[in-house]
Image (cartoon, rainbow, N blue to C red):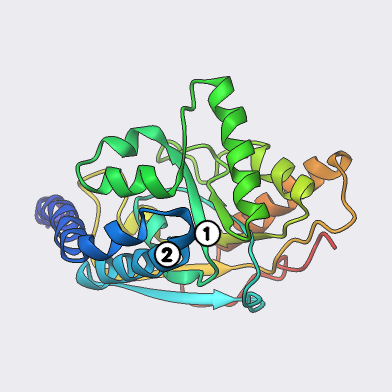
Amino acid sequence: MRGFKRVFAYLYHLWYYLVMLIVIVSISPFIYVTSLKENRYQNFFWWARFWAKSVLFLMGIRMKKFQSAPLLKEQHYIICTNHSSELDIMMCLALVPNCFVFIGKKELANIPLFGYFYKKTNILVDRKSISSKRSVLEKAAKKLKEGIGVCIYPEGGIPAPEIELAPFKMGAFKLAIEQGVSIVSISFPDNKTRFGDDWGVGSPGIARAIVHRPLHTDGLSLNDIHRLKDDCYRQIYSGLNISENNPSLPPEVVDIVS
């Protein structure tokens, strides 16, 4: 039985990449036109969400969302989530209707077709370069000033499978305080087992998402950066440990920083 599950998971991963290609080729004329100019990004974002929802649907992934507070319409946020799977990208797009861009590793730009649109519409970072990291924060600040949110994975990448939640980098929290933008934390407790980096693990089914109450930065200074980072970490970590039989929001999910 275990061998069958691993074979199925391997085929499931192949199916994922085929689905990604089919969907992106199908909508490529629309995303190409809307990616040509920055002022068309709102339209591109609509198609990006369509792509994400289509991939999840064709993979047999059903999202189950738990949300402690509604996101304000037309408001832009810094979105922080745990990073354990490629599903995180699709689920962020499917969950958050507020327009945003990703900060992601530059290596993804090498993926055929997907990489072209990824490079044109998101902010790429070379994690080995200090100057690249500094430039990324400047570009992200510019997007926030234009009214476009930013999605950052504060762990800095997908950690080793045995690590539930890696320590957070400071960039997202420095950016939030300097720009006066609220942080929305999201926990993905199932993505690692639903579709992790290990090709021997993966299957269709329910993937839960816990959208926590926004952490506001009004009145905060850089002296508060560690507290803000710790509050975000605590929110996300609490959401990774909700019970399958009792999937209500944990009591720790409150508006800690206000």
Quarter of the picture holding the C terminus: bottom right
> Could you tell whether 206 is left or right of 99 in the image?
left
Residue 36 picture location, percent across and down = 36, 53
Q: Nearer the viewer, residue 74 or 208?
A: 74
Residue 170 picture location, percent across and down = 68, 37
Measured along the vertical axis of the image, is residue 62 above or below residue 194?
below
> Could you tell whether 258 is left or right of 199 in the image?
right
Q: Which residue is mark 2?
A: 45
- Badge 1: how crowded within 10 Å, few (<14), some, or many (20+)? many
Instruction: Name the residue at 18% across, 52% down.
Output: 17
Instruction: Name the residue at 32% across, 49% down.
Output: 117
Q: Quadrant of residue 214?
A: bottom right
Measured along the vertical axis of the image, is residue 253 above or below residue 232?
below
Measured along the vertical axis of the image, is residue 192 above or below residue 116?
below
Q: Which residue is mark 1?
A: 100
For the residues labelled 1 and 2, say whether their Cβ atoms are less than 8 Å apart.
yes
Q: Quadrant of residue 88?
A: bottom left
Q: Quadrant of residue 191?
A: bottom left
Q: Nearer the viewer, residue 113 or 152?
A: 113
Amino acid type, callout 1: Phe
Give the numbered dot on residue 17: none
> Could you tell whether 145 is left or right of 240 in the image?
right
- Badge 2: how crowded within 10 Å, few (<14), some, or many (20+)? many
Quarter of the picture holding the N terminus: bottom left
Instruction: Name the residue at 27% across, 65% down.
Output: 30
Mark yes or no: residue 167 visible: no
Q: Nearer the viewer, residue 40 or 58?
A: 40
Between the residue at mark 1 and the residue at mark 2, the CA separation in whole angstroms equals 8 Å
Q: Secondary structure at mark 2?
A: helix
User: Tag 2 or tag 1, which sits nearer the N-term?
Assistant: 2
Amino acid type, callout 2: Phe
